Amino acid sequence: MSGAGKATDTYRMKEFPIPWKETLEGCRLSVENAERLAEDARILKRNNRAQSAYAIILDAWEELGKAVLLFRYFKQKEDISWKDWKKILRDHKHKRIAWAHSQDLLYGETLPKSVLQLKETFESAITQEDRNWFDLEREVGVYVDWLGPKEHWRSPCRMDSTWFNFPFTSDYWAPIVLAQCKHLRELIAKEEKAAENVI
């Protein structure tokens, strides 16, 4: 991390912990952003921009994961420390697996069949990938990179767009993100209604 990054981190540490009562608003905003990104991915894919759609849908999934993590802190009535916030904000893998590891929070003990199937598919993909792949899969849709003297450069502009259909296309993930966002919005609304009844 650069000197400027460390200085920013030191400054930001003064803003913590985040009170647990504030996490529901962060959750709502993250859901809203995940929906926006999922819709953007759909538009990009329809306009033959599969590479960008792929990167954007991964961002949408991460925003959904962030929303799930924030919702968990709200439900547990736990303030968010600086260390925990860095996981929620900066750790891509942590955000990507949050949904799969939070089914108890989102659905209780009995999962709908469609959610159970998605969870199993997602968890098998997670076990097959290491942390580097989580970063690489997003980067290939966005950045030019040097691969070495044999392969030279990799560019999203030069890659066959069918590569971005594996393992799942943005067409596959966008409806899933939007459906999960809708479900999380319903959970947030229940919490807000319960809070109104307490007052």
Image (cartoon, rainbow, N blue to C red):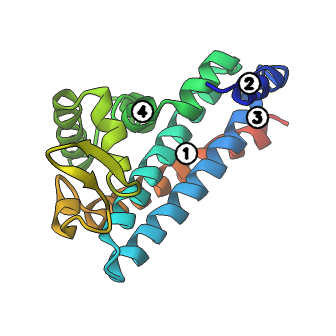
Question: Type of residue at label 3?
Answer: Glu
Please name the amino acid that badge 4 sits on. Answer: Ala
Tag 2 residue: 9
The image shows residue 152 at horizontal and vertical percentages of 23, 50
Cβ–Cβ below 8 Å for labels 3 and 4? Answer: no
SS at mark 3? helix
| Above-or-below relation of 90 to 186 | above
- Tell me whether the residue at label 4 lies in contact with that at label 1, contact meaning CB atoms closer than 8 angstroms: no
Whichever of callouts 3 and 4 sits on the residue coming sooner in the sequence is: 3
The one of 84 and 141 positioned closer to us in this rendering = 141
Identify the residue under disc 4: 98
Q: Which of marks 3 and 1 is in front?
A: 3
| Place of residue 113 in the rendered image (x, y in percent of width and height, measured from the top left) | 20, 46
User: Residues under labels 3 and 2: Cα distance?
Assistant: 21 Å
> Which residue type does callout 2 highlight?
Asp
Point out the tag, 3 or 1, that comes first from the N-terminus.
Answer: 3
Which quarter of the figure has residue 163?
bottom left
Indicate the position of residue 88 as horizontal and vertical percent values: 56, 30
Residue at (54% x, 52% y) in the render: 186
Distance (Cα) linking label 3 and label 1:
16 Å
Q: Name the residue under label 1.
A: 187
